[in-house]
Amino acid sequence: MTSRMSSYARPTRIDEALALLARSGRTILAGGTDFYPSRVETSPRDDVVDISALADLRGIQQTDTGWRFGAATIWTEVIEAKLPPLFDGLKLAAREVGGMQIQNSGTIAGNLCNASPAADGVPALLTLNARVEIAAADSRRVLPLEQFILGPRKTALRAGELVTAILVPKSAHPARSDFLKLGARKYLVISIAMVACVFEVEDGTVRAARVAVGSCSPVAMRLPKLEQALAGRPLDRHLGECVLAEHVQPLAPLDDVRASGAYRRQAALTLIRRSLERLA
Ligand SMILES: Cc1cc2nc3c(=O)[nH]c(=O)nc-3n(C[C@H](O)[C@H](O)[C@H](O)COP(=O)(O)OP(=O)(O)OC[C@H]3O[C@@H](n4cnc5c(N)ncnc54)[C@H](O)[C@@H]3O)c2cc1C
């Protein structure tokens, strides 16, 4: 019996990578921290395009309209970057992705493309109104993050496409942000629930609020009714009191080995209240 050999390429130019990806059946490898664990005890059969040598995919740049996070920017770069308070929540999330070894290798786009309901980067990026820049050999497109992750392990990526960047727009008002994760222990843990919040604040009033919850639905989600209830309120320590059980109704938390759905829903409510108090 003959077994099919896999191939490995590590291009240094994006056009070279896209040309390789245009051939059918190629798998993208970035930091490998999701790729390798999902292939334990199986022979590697993938034809791999390793994107870790694509310098254009690395680093964070400020642009006229916001910020551009290269797709292969590692979590440590996010943590160490000089960024305004709008990104404090994303930095807190970055610190929660595994330990330092994982943060030194795992990338921001890898976290999105893996499409885990428990991916720590997703709620924070949802509250940043992030958009996903995608390239193929003959096309370019940009999708809001909400339209990019379609379900557990399912994204809108088509064959031959590569995520090239995550784009975050400037906020209209000065913003502050937060992220809280609950797990069965403090570090190195898959979350039971997590919450990210961004507040745009002017003259002590919340002008816009964005709240997202992860690990409590097939894809992390924003809570628009809560966001509407928070907008226009004074930013004070009573803010948590406007969070009602009905605001977390859209969540669909599962019962699993980590927690029951009912516990997860309650945990989300508590984390949101705590986060609002921290932001105030
Ligand atoms: C011990 C350990 C602990 C972990 N803890 C956490 C945790 O606490 N929280 C958390 O959220 N995650 C955690 N992870 C998961 C992982 O580290 C992150 O999701 C990380 O951000 C993945 O990035 P990567 O570059 O390693 O992705 P890879 O493993 O290289 O790729 C992941 C998937 O994305 C695809 N992909 C990668 N980059 C692109 C791109 N630019 N365009 C298109 N497709 C792409 C790959 O084909 C693959 O399907 C952990 C992993 C390990 C091994």
Image: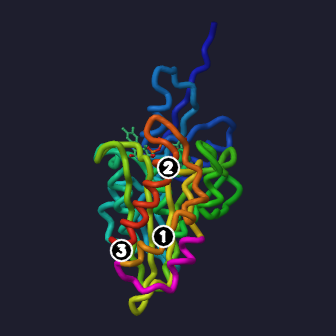
In front: 266, or 95?
A: 266
Front: mark 1 or 3: 1
Whether residue 201 appears in magenta in the rendering, the answer is no
Circles 3 and 2: CB distance less than 8 Å? no
> In the displayed structure, does residue 82 sit left or right of residue 244?
left
> In the displayed structure, does residue 140 sit left or right of residue 237?
right
Whether residue 233 appears in magenta in the rendering, the answer is yes
Query: From mark 1 to mark 3, how far is it between C-alphas?
Result: 14 Å
In the rendered structure, find residue 215 and report the number of the disc placed on it.
Answer: 2
Q: Which residue is mark 1?
A: 243
Q: Of helix, strand and loop, which one carries label 1?
A: loop
Q: If you read the primary sequence from the N terminus, does the residue marked by circle 2 or circle 1 appear first?
A: 2
Circles 1 and 3: CB distance less than 8 Å? no
Identified at 69% across, 48% down, the residue is 158
Q: Amino acid at mark 3?
A: Leu
| Bounds of the magenta segment | 225-237
Residue 62, image x and y in percent?
Answer: 44, 74
Q: Which residue is mark 3?
A: 279
Quarter residue 254 falls in = top right
